[in-house]
Amino acid sequence: MSKRRFKPNTIYLSVLANDHYTESLLEVVRVLQNKTTCFVTLNKPAFELEHSFRIHHVLPRNIFFVDTVTLGMGRKEDMKNVLYVSSPRAFTELSIAISEILKSGKFDCIVFDSLSTLSIYNAGDGAEEFASSLIQKTRAGRTLGVFTCLQGDMNNDLIQKSCMYVDEVVHFDDVHPELRQHASHMRTVVTVIGGIALLGVISSLYGFATPTGAVLGVDALPLPSFVLSLLVLVGSIGIGVFGYYVHRKVQIQPRVVMAASVRVRKNAGQLRTKFRKRIQDWLKNHPYLF
């Protein structure tokens, strides 16, 4: 993989750093933004991903999602560019969805996010067999495949076995070192903001604890000093909250672990028909992509 592109008809395992996972994933999407992409998400619902892409100036107009999260959250969404699968555990359902994507012949790339999450739902060797099957299907369809995982999960059995099936293992930090630098800068900023907030709180509390200007035991702390201390306290808390928000904004947790749900047997033929119609409807409304 070069710095700005993936090679066509190649299967990648893209290893993303735990501490700036979101930024790395956004960069993957940026590199692919001129390709018609199927984004399979086991981590975040499609509506959250699309919102995140937009606020980071990545237009999702050529992205079709396979969302395994939203229905499990009990949400009633119906985005036209989303195919909803009941659960990340629904391997058969998910396999049918991806098979229909590949059969359409209209997608340049499949992004699977992520193998790390898939390993959470491993029942025996089920997840490993599913990952292997999916990689082979993508290769047989002569489609670019990008399978993500977390750096911290590289010793996981499923990830280790997947490494044997892909064409290239890419550590995204090595290809895009600026992501590591940006994450380091953000940690520095958050630390400085936190330090300012802490100093402000200490200063404010010290002001309350050591009043000056006592006159006959009445009004020991003059009103202007009291107001100033109160403003410093409130401002410091506000700065601290803002710093924490900024930190969380760039360090979104990459996994939404779905609670176990009762499995409902579904008719495979009906699923294929339903999924194929959803895909075809989206493709018909986006003729400029082809």
Image (cartoon, helix red, strand yellow):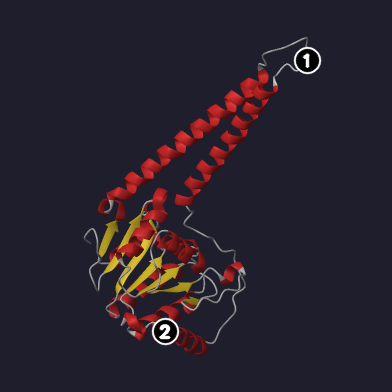
Instruction: Pick out the residue farthest to the top.
Output: 216
Considering the image in quadrants, where does the C terminus appear? bottom left
Question: Which residue is labeled 2 in the image?
Answer: 285
- What amino acid type is highlighted by mark number 2? Asn
Residue 218, image x, y percentages: 78, 15
Considering the image in quadrants, where does the N terminus appear? bottom left
Residue under the point 33% across and 68% down:
33
Judging depth in this view, the residue of 182 and 129 nearest the camera is: 182
Residue 251 in view here: no
Judging depth in this view, the residue of 9 and 53 nearest the camera is: 53
Residue under the point 38% across and 45% down:
183
Question: Which residue is labeled 1 in the image?
Answer: 218
Residue 253, image x, y percentages: 49, 54
Judging depth in this view, the residue of 91 and 281 nearest the camera is: 281
When the figure is inspected, residue 108 is found, relative to residue 186, above or below; the finding is below
As helix, strand or loop, the secondary structure at mark 2 comes to: loop
Badge 1: residue crowd in 10 Å (few <14, some 14–19, many ≥20): few
As helix, strand or loop, the secondary structure at mark 1 comes to: loop
Badge 2: residue crowd in 10 Å (few <14, some 14–19, many ≥20): few
Pick whichever of labels 2 and 1 is earlier in the sequence: 1
- What amino acid type is highlighted by mark number 1? Val
